[in-house]
Image (spheres, rainbow, N blue to C red):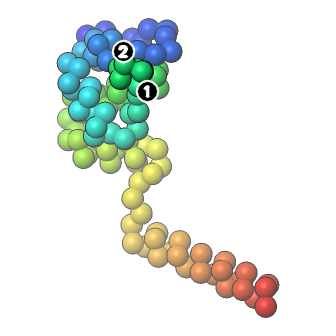
Amino acid sequence: MDESIPDKAYFRIGEVGRILGVHTYVVRYWESEFKSIKPIRTKSDQRLYRRQDVEELLLIKNLLYRDKFTISGAKKQLSKTRGEGALDEDTGEKRLARIKSGLLQIRKIIS
């Protein structure tokens, strides 16, 4: 299970499967579950994965297999590491209060 990514711009799904050490249907499934994986399609409708897609898939594989996350847990972990975490109610309410305050200031300036 060699996880070193060759120095190439694009990879076919079979190559990605070999790099990850998983079957191609697993790669297709992860692609459908994780929206950050977006391979381009050739005219013959073959998937071509960019290097960043392969790196993202390696991260997903590690979260699922090594760290034992579920699919939904891996999604949450990925969004958390990117700073896209879901807002809790306090933070959402504070954000809305700041927006309202800003809009009221704009209203005063316009009037």
Residue 22 picture location, percent across and down: 22, 18
Q: Disc 1 to disc 2, how far (Cα)?
A: 10 Å
Q: In this rendering, does residue 45 appear at all?
A: yes
Rendering coords of residue 88 (x, y %): 39, 66
Residue 86 placement: quadrant: bottom left
The quarter of the rendered structure image containing the C terminus is bottom right
Q: Residue drawn 49% across and 10% down? A: 8
Amino acid type, callout 1: Ile
Q: Position of residue 40 (x, y in %)?
A: 43, 27
Q: Nearer the viewer, residue 21 or 13?
A: 13
Residue furthest bottom in the image: 111
Name the residue nearer the viewer: 39 or 46.
Answer: 46
Residue at screen point 33% across, 11% down: 15
Q: Amino acid at mark 2?
A: Arg
Q: Residue at x 42, y 21 (%)?
A: 42
Name the residue tied to disc 1.
40
Which of the pair 88/52 is nearer the observer? Answer: 52
Residue at the extreme front: 43
Specify the quadrant that holds the N terminus: top left
